[in-house]
Image: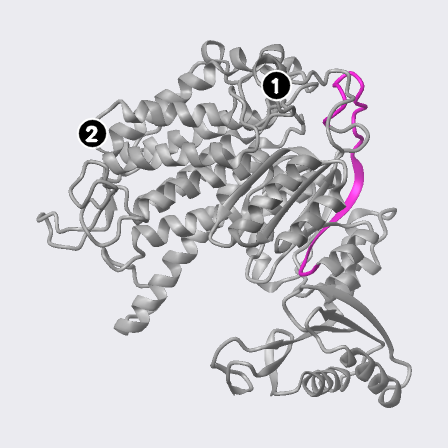
């Protein structure tokens, strides 16, 4: 079905483009994964790009939803009313959300660079202010990009950009992405981005004409990437990250024309060689050189499987610009594939190193690193050749669980589960859960969402995994303590159905609660709470409002144990008082005979305390 075209690059166009990009990357994901061959042939570029854009889509949708709620509240309209024109977010808000969502959700080298491309584009589109065609040459200069005016056709207020603004945005995006890479190499996504900007600069016209020219320029550049990178030529493929960017630009064309460009013939443009012909001995660089030299010497032949650092380290970092400049130098000396993107105090860091601890310590010295991911390129990984790599045998059964803190992630991992970390205010998207199911590499998977609000996300992920041949059972756990109970009775040796029934029964027999702090004044089932009040929630509903964490926790525990129980599980967050666990353990020993208590450290889990009673 043809897409209804957007006339200008406004907030609605941003929303449309993000959605179309996500769908297009979903269709192309496996093909892009298959041609991921430099410098780490880990076969996940398509997946990483998809997850990055999925995060951007979620952020944009959240902005639109927030505006719909505010508009409804201010006008007294009924919930669900469609937001009219002029009532939604501004272009600056929409592109800002897109860039921020991509930044915090970026995955891998390619996703990190794509996040910077989107950020660079957003910086231009959001910088126009309130005057028409504001730009470096003045309010009416040809370099302006944001237009806020009355077009005279229907009398409403405009907040959009046109063709010249889009050209500027594409140029700035390409330049900012190249600057984010420590040692750029041609024949990568950076080359494709630059070609797109060059082609856009060569045309006059509206957003549709500029988008079409950018896509055609990028597609032509993609076809020549094997001539620039020997690894691609030997494998008979084009750059995977560049392929992903061409896919995103095709979605941009569809946004403004209503139709997606015709895909080029594979043979003519080299979009993908058959998988059997793709040699994973070399990998695509996504714009990062393994060595710090130029020309042909910038490529290191890793066909013998001896080259390459042992770890991929990724984290978000809150730090000042000056500290990040020093961090770049420090990480550049530690390893390669260094990409640092972001700004305004929030950065996304990606690097390949042999000493993962040193890379994290460098982040600690620069500011506050969090959402830290460390991947080990171990035996049979992407640094070994295809001939040397033994096929990884699928496990019969695995458990995939969403957990709210690093401490619980470690606990679940020790029990054999594959974990997905849910940060406060940043629930995982369905693509992340699907990716975790793939990482588990099992024929049968038990999925534990551990959050009532993730039930639809988890159901979508389970359905997607089933289409890929994985047998998935979704147990609707509402809290991490219910997941702990389910995991405790998990037995991979018994029949799948029996195991699922036992785990479901254990989770269902576990009442759950949490102690947290109110962020704002609100009506609750226990009365009105003020910002800063301590709340005790039992089975998802506010049951206690107080001012002292220990007192509220004790009241919650008493209410739960009034109905009986044999085991109390306490999971302490980083910000919980040190004395609360000892106080609750003592209370259980004194007041409830034959009830055991176990305490875990949850880390930065959002809630001060999680409580489970089995």
The residue nearer to you, when weighing 83 against 195, is 195
- On the rendered structure, is 91 left or right of 495? left
Using residue 19 as the reference point, say whether residue 474 is left or right of it.
right
In the depicted structure, whether residue 162 falls above or below residue 361: above
The magenta region covers 382-405
Q: Earlier in the sequence, mark 2 or mark 1?
A: 2
Q: Is residue 318 above or below residue 462?
A: below
Residue at x 64% of width, y 16% of height? 278
Left/right of residue 460 with respect to residue 171 in the rendered view: right
The main secondary structure of the magenta stretch is loop
Mark 2–mark 1 distance (CA, rounded to whole Å): 39 Å
Choose top left, top right, bottom left or bottom right for residue 172: top left
> Which quadrant, please, contains the N terminus?
top left
Query: Where does the image place residue 414, in percent across and percent down from the top left?
Result: 83, 53
* Residue appearing at x 36%, y 21% in the figure: 217
What is the total number of numbered labels drawn onto the structure image?
2
Other residues around mark 1 within 10 Å, as few (<14) / some (14–19) / many (≥20): some
| Residue 239 visible to the viewer | yes
Please say if 101 is above or below 603. above
Outermost residue, left direction?
152
Say which quarter of the image contains residue 293.
top right
Q: Residue 182 vs residue 197: left or right?
A: right
Rendered location of residue 209, percent (x, y): 25, 28
Residue at label 1?
298
Q: Which residue corresponds to mark 2?
A: 205
Image quarter where the C terminus lies is bottom right
Judge whether residue 6 is colored magenta.
Answer: no
User: Answer yes or no: do the residues labelled 2 and 1 have beta carbons within 8 Å?
Assistant: no
Disc 1 is placed on an element classified as helix
Is residue 1 visible in the rendered image? The answer is no
Element carrying mark 2: loop
């Amino acid at each position: 079905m043809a897409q209804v075209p957007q006339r200008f690059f406004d907030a609605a166009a941003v929303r449309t483009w993000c959605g179309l990009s996500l769908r297009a990357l979903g269709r192309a994901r496996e093909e892009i994964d298959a041609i991921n061959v430099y410098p780490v042939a880990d076969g996940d570029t398509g997946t990483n790009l998809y997850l990055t854009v999925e995060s951007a889509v979620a952020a944009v949708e959240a902005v639109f939803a927030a505006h719909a709620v505010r508009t409804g509240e201010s006008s007294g309209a009924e919930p669900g009313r469609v937001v009219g024109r002029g009532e939604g977010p501004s272009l600056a808000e929409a592109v800002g959300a897109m860039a921020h969502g991509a930044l915090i959700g970026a995955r891998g080298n390619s996703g990190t660079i794509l996040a910077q491309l989107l950020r660079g584009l957003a910086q231009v589109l959001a910088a126009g202010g309130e005057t028409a065609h504001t730009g470096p040459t003045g309010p009416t200069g040809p370099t302006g990009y944001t237009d806020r005016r009355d077009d005279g056709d229907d009398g409403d207020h405009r907040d959009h950009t046109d063709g010249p603004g889009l050209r500027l945005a594409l140029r700035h995006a390409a330049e900012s992405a190249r600057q984010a890479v420590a040692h750029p190499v041609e024949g990568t996504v950076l080359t494709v981005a630059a070609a797109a900007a060059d082609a856009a600069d060569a045309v006059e016209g509206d957003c549709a004409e500029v988008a079409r020219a950018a896509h055609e320029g990028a597609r032509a550049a993609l076809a020549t990437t094997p001539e620039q990178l020997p690894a691609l030529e030997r494998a008979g493929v084009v750059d995977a990250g560049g392929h992903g960017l061409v896919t995103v630009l095709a979605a941009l064309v569809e946004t403004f024309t209503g139709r997606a460009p015709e895909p080029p013939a594979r043979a003519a443009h080299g979009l993908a060689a058959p998988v059997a012909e793709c040699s994973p001995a070399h990998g695509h660089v996504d714009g990062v050189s393994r060595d710090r030299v130029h020309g042909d010497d910038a490529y290191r032949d890793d066909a013998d499987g001896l080259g390459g650092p042992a770890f991929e380290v990724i984290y978000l970092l809150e730090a000042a610009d000056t500290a990040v400049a020093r961090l770049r130098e420090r990480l550049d000396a530690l390893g390669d594939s260094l990409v640092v993107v972001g700004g305004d105090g929030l950065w996304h860091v990606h690097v390949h190193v042999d000493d993962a601890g040193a890379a994290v310590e460098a982040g600690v010295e620069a500011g506050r690193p969090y959402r830290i991911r460390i991947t080990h390129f171990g035996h049979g990984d992407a640094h070994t050749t295809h001939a040397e790599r033994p096929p990884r045998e699928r496990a019969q059964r695995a458990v995939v669980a969403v957990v709210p803190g690093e401490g619980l992630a470690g606990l679940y991992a020790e029990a054999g589960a594959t974990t997905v970390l849910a940060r406060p205010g940043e629930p995982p998207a369905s693509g992340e859960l699907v990716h975790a199911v793939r990482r588990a590499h099992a024929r049968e998977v038990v999925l534990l969402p551990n959050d009532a609000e993730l039930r639809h996300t988890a159901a979508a992920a389970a359905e997607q995994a089933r289409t890929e041949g994985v047998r998935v059972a979704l147990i609707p756990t509402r809290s991490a303590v219910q997941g702990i109970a389910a995991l405790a009775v998990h037995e991979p040796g018994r029949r799948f159905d029996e195991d699922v029934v036992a785990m479901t029964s254990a989770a269902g027999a576990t009442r759950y609660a949490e102690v947290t702090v109110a962020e704002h004044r609100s009506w609750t089932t226990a009365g009105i709470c003020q910002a800063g009040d301590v709340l005790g929630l039992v089975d998802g509903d506010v049951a206690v409002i107080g001012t002292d964490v220990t007192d509220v926790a004790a009241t919650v525990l008493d209410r739960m144990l009034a109905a009986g129980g044999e085991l109390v599980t306490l999971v302490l967050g980083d910000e919980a008082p040190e004395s609360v666990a000892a106080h609750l353990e003592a209370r259980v020993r004194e007041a409830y005979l034959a009830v055991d208590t176990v305490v875990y450290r949850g880390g930065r889990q959002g809630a001060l305390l999680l409580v489970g009673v089995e």
